[in-house]
Amino acid sequence: MNIQQTLSIIKPDAMKLKYSGKIIDFLEEKGFSIIAQKKIVLTKNQAEAFYIVHKDRPFFNELVEFMISGPIVVQIIEAKNAVSLYREIMGSTDPDKAEEGTIRKLYGSNIQCNAVHGSDSVENATTETSFFFNKLEMIK
Ligand code: IDP
Ligand code: MG
């Protein structure tokens, strides 16, 4: 059993459309446990720091503006092979290309407003979970 934790973010588009409950339900249905969870609004500095790996991509400024445009829910979620399992059930970045039944297909609007974020590697999951949460906020 390779139990892992990964970071999930319910993005501003899905929050505005009131999909947060459906997304959390979906995660629990797929076997994830919620280890930590909070609703926040990112500052510009925080959003830039979180997405620093994308700083040279053409969509960087747009992405930062989008991510600070409203509340988000950040979560640490845990399951067997959580990182790859979450990437699988999230679906492709572009909801139009995402497989049927994935979160982005069900709840995403377009390539930017695609409902959720999930860490893309075990290493990044560690960095990203500790970006938002300290040990006291993590409850098994
Ligand atoms: P991922 O979220 O599937 O890992 P990344 O390539 O890491 O995709 O991009 C991070 C986020 O940046 C995406 O989830 C999406 O919100 C946004 N994004 C990615 N590509 C584009 C684009 O071509 N135009 C606008 N926004 C984009
Ligand atoms: Mg990514």
Image (cartoon, rainbow, N blue to C red):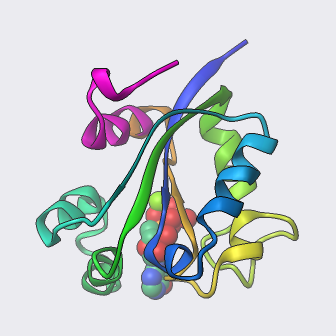
Q: Residue at x 59, y 64 (%)?
A: 20
Image position of 132 (left or right of 100): left
Verify whether residue 87 appears in magenta.
Answer: no
- Residue 56, by quadrant, is bottom left
Horizontal side of 43 relative to 95 (left or right) equals left
Dominant secondary structure of the residues highlighted in magenta in the image = helix
The residues colored magenta run 125-140
Name the residue nearer the viewer: 119 or 140: 140
Give the answer, above or below, for where 90 lies relative to 68.
above
Of residue 25 and residue 64, the one placed in the foreground of this image is 25
Residue 125 pos. (x, y %): 44, 37
Asked if one can make out residue 1 in the rendered structure from this viewpoint, the answer is yes
Q: How many circles with numbers are drawn on the protein?
A: 0
Give the quarter of the image for residue 67. bottom left
| Quarter that holds the N terminus | top right
Question: Residue 123 appears at what percent x and percent y?
Answer: 41, 33
